[in-house]
Image: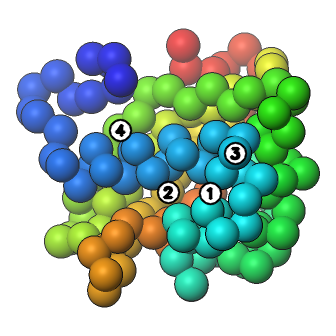
Amino acid sequence: MTPSDQHAQEPQHPDVTEAIVRERSLHDPAVRRSGPLTESLLDPGFTEVGASGRRWTRAEMVAALPTLHGGDGDAVPITAEHFEGTVLAPGIVHLTYVTRVGDAHAHRSSIWRRDAAGEFRLLYHQGTPVPDGTARS
């Protein structure tokens, strides 16, 4: 993580760091191809509104993730940068960041919630496509 990924004035909260690590793991092709690994990261109540505009349930995402961008080890990788995080309440973290797949950029927003076992799980995710030429560098 580079200094530009953090607020310069304040140290990053450990929960934010943990949520970023878990968010980044969802971009790993090995995780994307593994239903059990993906399920371990997604909250049972998970929903997503993807950059395509489609709404996804947990079961739909677990089934589709191996076929989406970054699921194939030979595909163009997902690059994620400019992470910012906020602790909304104890055990709840909101992340924002930017992804790039080839020339396509998207702004991302995720809410991570700590479960009863103490693990952060992704509760909600949204991707918003960025028009060409307007992506944050």
Q: Which mark is residue 126?
A: 1
Q: Are marks 2 and 1 in contact (CB under 8 Å)?
A: yes
Mark 4 or 3, nearer chain start = 3
Mark 3 or 1, nearer chain start = 3
Quadrant where the N terminus is found in the figure: top left
Q: Secondary structure at mark 4?
A: strand
Q: Which mark is residue 30?
A: 3
Q: Amino acid at mark 3?
A: Ala
- Crowding around mark 2 (Cα neighbors within 10 Å: few <14, some 14 to 19, many 20+) is many
Image position of 32 (left or right of 112): right
Mark 2 or 4, nearer chain start = 4
Look at mark 4 in the image and give the residue it sits on. Answer: 84
Q: Amino acid at mark 1?
A: Gln
Mark 1 or 4, nearer chain start = 4
- Residue visible at 51% across and 41% down? 24
Residue 69 appears in the picture as rendered: no
- Residue visible at 9% across and 33% down? 10
Q: Secondary structure at mark 2?
A: strand
Q: Amino acid at mark 2?
A: Ser
- Residue visible at 34% across and 17% down? 2
Q: CA distance from mark 1 to mark 4?
A: 15 Å
In the image, residue 125 above or below residue 102? below
Image position of 57 (left or right of 110): right
**How many numbered marks does the figure carry?**
4
- Residue visible at 44% across and 63% down? 111
Residue 51 on image: x %, y %: 76, 49
Q: Secondary structure at mark 3?
A: helix
